[in-house]
Amino acid sequence: MTTQGIVGQFLSLKEETDADLLAMQCGDFYEFFADDAETVGRELDLKVSQKSSHGSSYPMAGVPLNDLTPYLKALVERGYRVAVADQYETESGDLRRQITRVVTPGTLLETSRDDAQFLAAVVTGDDGLGLAFADITTGQFLVTEAESVADAAAELYRFAPVEVLPGPDLRTDDEALSRLRETTDASFSLFSTESFAPGRARHAVRDQFGDATVESVGLDSELATRAAGGILAYVEETGAGVLRSMTRLQVYHASDLLELDATTQRNLELTETMHGDRSGSLFDTIDHTVTSPGGRLLREWLTRPRRDRDELSRRLDAVQSLASAALARERVREVLDGAYDLERLASRAASGSAGANDLLSVRDTLDVLPALADAIDGTELADSPLAEVVSRPDRDAAASLQTELADALAEDPPKTVTQGGLFQRGYDDELDGLIERHESAKSWLDTLADREKRQHGLSHVTVDRNKTDGYYIQVGKSVADQVPDYYRQIKTLKNSKRFVTEELEEKEREVLRLEETRGDLEYDLFQDLRERVADRAELLQNVGRTLAEVDALASLATHAAGNGWTRPELTDAGSLRIEAGRHPVVETTTEFVPNDLHMDRERGFLIVTGPNMSGKSTYMRQAALITLLAQVGSFVPARSATIGVVDGIYTRVGALDELAQGRSTFMVEMQELSNILHSATEESLVILDEVGRGTATYDGISIAWAATEYLHNEVRAKTLFATHYHELTTLADHLDRVANVHVAADERDGDVTFLRTVVDGPTDRSYGIHVADLAGVPRPVVDRAGDVLDRLRDEKAIEAKGSGSSEPVQAVFDVGSGQMKVESGSDSRNSDTRAGGSPEAGAPQNGSVESASEVVGESADRAIDAETEAVLDELQSTDVNATSPIDLMAKVQAWQSKLEGEE
Ligand code: ADP
């Protein structure tokens, strides 16, 4: 084949695939050509040479045949999808090449990540979305449905897939697609639309998992089935050969899990911080697992907290017994330390890529199971649910596979599985015979030198073998003339000569023949053995899962014992009582001041005030994380805790990352608020860390005010709301379940000391100005801020310094009604009194707006332009009680832009 031919073939194979790169076998190498060669050269620091032919020159880069895997892995982990074309010989002896597999981020078997490696598929339909998640490295396969794109995004965030297959409808839905893309770093791969078609998908799923499984797990959702079908077809097409290890179809319903939208998962820094670091996340802090499957499972638990108290109590029982039995726990962890990643080994066996060392790892890990049972028997752990976990897999089947492997494999097998040396004596009679003959032929060769020395009185004789000469007898030059006649010389070296004899050549042929036969036989035997292991993939996955579960439970116990955590008592959603609670992450790096929290059905809404940086958001996150940990089945950082099991945690906190994404902060804030107001229920926990900050003060207060009322009156969710709007604290007087708490601070001589203690009641004053002072804000600004604050306190009114008009305008925030008014300076006293006329009313009242507008009318020609008047008219005619918070926000936003003159 000419070079032109090879490059031509490369380019036409490249046409066949939508992979980013193609590695094509050319003899002993896999070659990349043209642009691919440049890319690979750059990414992997490979030497790029030029292959010229027919007047054209092509860049070319290659890797040795047996070294492809690490290069593939490196490329795929950098996000490339790589097609591999292998070379084969036709019957007529021609060399052909064809693409045998495509390795993509989601179908990479030899992964170096400890985390799960999910491949996801998302389809959309009239009734929502269908989702499927498969980890081909472990055989996990989960499907579910989601009602909305936001719900689907939350699930994507939970699973953190490395590759996503969008279904056909989704591809044309730009908005949904970009929403999903935002929640994941995964690469999106387009894949044949037919695979997602209902009939075809149903068939694929039943084919894969069997009718019985499909029925028993209750997979009746067409959407979920379509997503699953897409994944199965993709895995098959990419040719990783792991379909058979996917044995565990699970259908889950988001409603069984604690609802956590993507924003909340990010805000709570479950698996990575807001800055994207693993270190400093909750997972990183509490992970003491000793195996990577244990780490994966713990991470899964953290991102998928549960609601059913039975399962949680079971986990808590196990953690409790492990936490109190320090010695037994350490023994359990020691035993686990000897375990390999059985789920992944099962997939490697299934795909035919497991080597002898992998099967030895299977053997050793199967041995961990009885050792674990021994470590539990006769200790305090024997009566805990841990004993039940360990007895779950089929112990007899595991033991018999273990024995089979132990009897078969040699202790120190070579890396390649084709050259023999894999098996023990006694495993196979035919092999034993071969080995015996092979060994005896080799030992004849090994002792030949001695024999020749003795027989012929030669002093310098060695017998060796190399590629060109085969076996030879090497004799030192000084004695070379003493060799017998039947020695045939084949080479002269500087100090020696090489000879062969007929007998040696015959032995050589025998050894080579035996080596080859032995290699072939061992390879066949090995493939059989690997097949038998692959057939038991499900058993291996069960054992692997069990070991992972014990590891994860022991990890929770280790952290609990080491950090003085306590078992939470689980109860109805309404209450939340934490005594001396701490933030699980902050407490590990800071001298933490513990805090109490008390909420119940009568006291379900806490307004948290306190100076900036005093600890408000830490306090609220702590409440959310303690609740979440309890719903993971973990102990919690507190002296005691009674945790109401909630259906979801919703948070809205600072907008650091949205800013980075270039979205309007205020818009995002409102979208998040909107989502919470729509999704939270009476059984939920809501954390609001400042609402309305992204807009002008009065807008902000109004929105915060209305949202509080709505959450309190309509949603009735357990809510913690930190705000710097001191005005909101008066809501406690009007709304029966609202209470104020604040983070105490001490101020002396202008210095503020944060005490970090949360106590009942609102803050008595704002320390913001002192913080500004400490931060070096210029003195006149600080003084003026002090003035303004005093005026606000006295009058609840602020005099805005108008620029163009002679008359200053006063804007008044009426605490009693929760409304704002704009009025002329001269009338301020009067209208202030009027506006404060209905202090007992919790809900805003239209009456006071009217009076405000009268005032506005009087002064319109002096201070208020037509735009403003129009806005005020609209404001007046808006019935706040009859308008949903969302609509209200939209209106406020529209007014705002009118006032800013950007209609
Ligand atoms: P805020 O939300 O009031 O601005 P933060 O919750 O962000 O304040 O806390 C400010 C700083 O105080 C953080 O560095 C945090 O780690 C620390 N902190 C908060 N609460 C405590 C506490 N109870 N004990 C010790 N340090 C705390």
Image: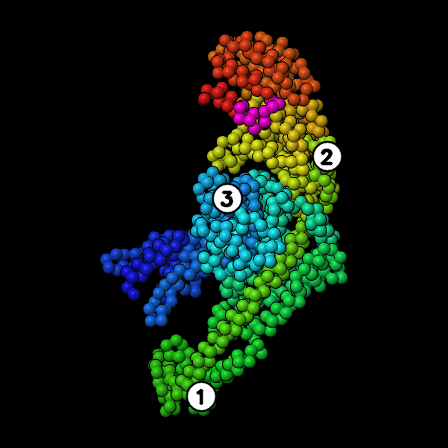
Disc 2: CA contacts within 10 A as few (<14), some (14-19) or many (>=20): some
Q: Where is residue 419 shown, x and y percent of the image?
A: 47, 73
| Three-letter residue code for mark 2 | Asp
Considering only vertical position in the picture, is 41 above or below 898? below
* Disc number placed over residue 600 in the picture, else none: 2
Q: Quadrant of residue 269?
A: top right
Q: Is residue 697 magenta?
A: no
Mark 3–mark 2 Cα distance, whole angstroms, equals 40 Å
Left or right of 607 in this view: 667? left
Mark 2–mark 1 Cα distance, whole angstroms, equals 96 Å
In the image, which is nearer the foreground, mark 2 or mark 1?
A: 2
Q: Quadrant of residue 737?
A: top right
* Disc number placed over residue 124 in the picture, else none: 3
Prevalent SS, magenta region: helix
Disc 3: CA contacts within 10 A as few (<14), some (14-19) or many (>=20): many
Q: Tag 3 or tag 1, which sits nearer the N-term?
A: 3
Q: Where is residue 490 shown, x and y percent of the image?
A: 35, 83
Segment tinted magenta in the rendering = 880-892
In the image, which is nearer the foreground, mark 1 or mark 3?
A: 3
